[in-house]
Image (spheres, helix red, strand yellow):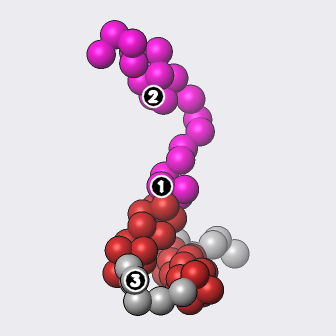
Amino acid sequence: MREDRPAVAQGITTHYNSGVDEGRITDVKLQKRLMAGRASVPLLRHRVVLIAHLRRRYTERQNPSPR
């Protein structure tokens, strides 16, 4: 625990947020599990890109930009 203290302090105090990246990694892992042994890499790539596109559209709909 003491070894991780500087990393935790930096994670709390810095403005950088890796939430978006973590969400995309979670999506990729989910698709890999769902398609394990059933599809090729190009199909997996296509589905990951599609999910990213749909997630972006859903987020934009939830947070409309001010005009």
| Residue 42 percent location from the top left of the image | 62, 86
* Amino acid at circle 2: Ile
N-term mark: 2 or 3? 2
Which label lies toward us, 1 or 2? Answer: 1
Name the disc covering residue 22, or none.
1
What span is in magenta?
1-22
N-term mark: 1 or 2? 2
Pick the quarter of the image with the N terminus: top left
* Amino acid at circle 1: Glu
Q: Is residue 27 left or right of residue 47?
A: left
Name the disc covering residue 37, or none.
3
Any magenta on residue 28?
no
Name the residue: 39% across, 18% down: 4
Secondary element under disc 2, as helix, strand or loop, is helix
| Residue 24 percent location from the top left of the image | 51, 65
Q: Residue furthest right?
A: 67
How far apart are the alpha carbons under marks 2 and 3?
40 Å
